[in-house]
Image (cartoon, rainbow, N blue to C red):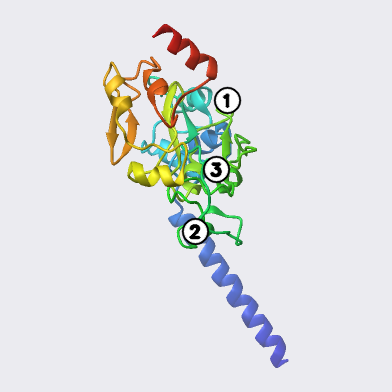
Amino acid sequence: MIYLKAVLSLGLMGAVFGLALALAAKKFAIEQDPRQDRIVEVLPGANCGGCGFPGCSGLAAAIVAEKAPVDGCPVGGPAVAAKVAAIMGVEVGAAKERKVARVLCQGSSDNCGSRFVYDGLSDCKAAQLVDGGAKACVYGCLGLGSCVAACSFDALHMGPDGLPVVDEEECTSCGRCVAACPRGIIQLVPAAQSVTVLCRSYARGAEVRKTCKVGCIGCGLCVKVCPTGAVTVENNLAVIDPAKCDACGKCVEKCPTKCIVMKGAKASADALAAS
């Protein structure tokens, strides 16, 4: 009998507390804008974080709160932006310049050796923790493919030379590979940018020559031949301003280590012939 009373008492208390919680939840519930769910439905669902918010639901909430633009999803592009804009009852602004990931390093094992044999986790950030990485160039690609593992869109794969290769047609500019690289070698650049410096070394020229065959030595020859002033040397590294570059190819031709390249061999040849 005592046990029965105890059970009944606990059951009654549970029912009372449950009812109280239900009433409190209803009273203090925050109503969600129905447009948020509609926006989530049209977003690609990649949850890549490329928009700067925690997943697609986070972006949808920010758009409804007018804290993010309707074209804030880099994966969805113009098509998704138009659908989101229709839900929000606004017009899409001028289309953003499409960006793609580029690997700014050519330091394969043939071009850049190692300081020691790394035998640890197959992860670039882990390798970086071991005496700054095994690569002879402390700025070069570690080649363990953390960027490839981070890509959700099959836009990255490891090439035969041990360096990651970007499929720019498949790249959504989500930025996951950029975040995965501990050396900042992968960057998002305008897709239309044809001339790129494929090096991230800030070492002096003499040191670069000792470690890498294709590294920038900061010689400044590219600066001298550029007719538009698009090339500068900053911290021993050549930098190209895409807004000023007319893809004439003169810097590509003059670079002694061939670290400045033009996208597409045919484009490079045509540009040099025209110059």
Residue 18 lies left or right of residue 247; in this view the side is right
The front one of 250 and 60 is 250
Please state the horizontal and vertical placement of residue 181, each as a whole percent of the image: 49, 47
- Give the structural element (helix, strand or loop) at label 2: helix
Residue 90 at least partly seen: no
Please state the horizontal and vertical placement of residue 59, each as a whole percent of the image: 46, 40
Q: Where is 249 relative to 14, above or below?
A: above
The front one of 166 and 229 is 229
The front one of 55 and 270 is 270
Please state the horizontal and vertical placement of residue 243, each as a whole percent of the image: 32, 21
Circle 3: residue type: Asn
Identify the residue position indicated by label 2 in the image: 25
Circle 2: residue type: Ala
Give the number of marks.
3
Depth-wise, is mark 1 or mark 3 nearer the camera? Answer: 1
Q: N-terminal of the two: label 3 or label 2? A: 2
Q: Residue furthest bottom?
A: 2
